[in-house]
Image (spheres, rainbow, N blue to C red):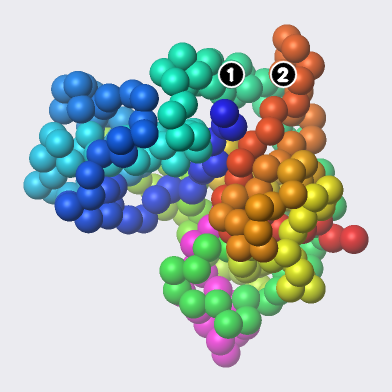
Amino acid sequence: MAAPSTSAVPTHFFPRRRTESYPLHLALNFQQLPQESLSQYYSHFHLRSRPDATEGELAVGVAQHFDQFFELKPAETEDAVINAFVMRYKNEKRPHSRRQAGRQAAAAAAGADGDGGGGMEVGDQVAAKIGSDWILGLVTKTFPSKGKVQVEDLDSDDDDSGKQNKRYHMLGPSMVKALTGTDEEGASLGLHSRVMAVYPQTTSFYPGTVVQAPRSVTAARLVIKFDDDEDADTGVTAEHRIQRTHVLPLSR
């Protein structure tokens, strides 16, 4: 089982529709959790729930997010899910300096040239260059006459009261890349492609390599090994199934 792809703060409700049912293939039953625990899960991952959401609706939302977060395969056992959780925890404990080095390597390899924000609309997700880093952002305003867009940093923090402090950046043409799931020439990203992609449970782009050929040119996810992501104990580099629209080619 691959580790999650995530990372961006969802802007829609979980579940999207009240009529959605609990994913039957999920080995864990979140319907057994009390509403307080379900609410804590929502809070931790910044998920949106309806003000009048029922306990059953919250359980469906948690299950859907957990399923996407860990990219579970059909009939995955509870033991496999727990093992993946433990591996995720160990990976998250890797030194911050290594993460920072990887993020800066991605930024340097990607180059400074964005796509100018041309044709971008409010609500589009983008890769935004902030300082030396590339982060995941959301276009909140466009200024065609200035050739700029306002981008919300999707890694906004919560203050002591739990209120989210959103951060915005006004960015010019060289600081924004559209997230379309294809490379600059319009060809699909394939096996051995060098990319930068959103690392699981973050909103930052890191360098890596596509290690499995996509099942189709429209495959929703790509299997990627990130640079310097070896497990501290085993030396094995984990494979991550990353949402295609969170992957960009490294400049040649």
Quarter of the image for the N terminus: give it.
top right
Give SS at disc 2.
Answer: loop
Few, some or many residues within 10 Å of mark 1 (<14, 14–19, 20+): some
- What is the number of the mark on residue 231? 2
Q: Which residues are magenta?
A: 133-150
Contact (CB < 8 A) between labels 2 and 1?
yes
Note whether residue 205 is visible.
Answer: no
The amino acid pointed to by label 1 is Met
Note whether residue 24 is visible.
Answer: yes
Q: Image point 17% across, 41% down: which residue?
A: 57
Residue 32 shown in magenta: no
Q: Image point 56% across, 68% down: which residue?
A: 170
Residue 135 shown in magenta: yes
Q: In the depicted view, which residue is nearer to us: 141 or 87?
A: 87
Q: In the depicted view, which residue is nearer to us: 57 or 133?
A: 57
Q: Image point 45% across, 74% down: which residue?
A: 122
Q: Quadrant of residue 47?
A: top left
Residue projecting furthest to the front: 75
Image x and y of residue 213, in percent: 74, 49
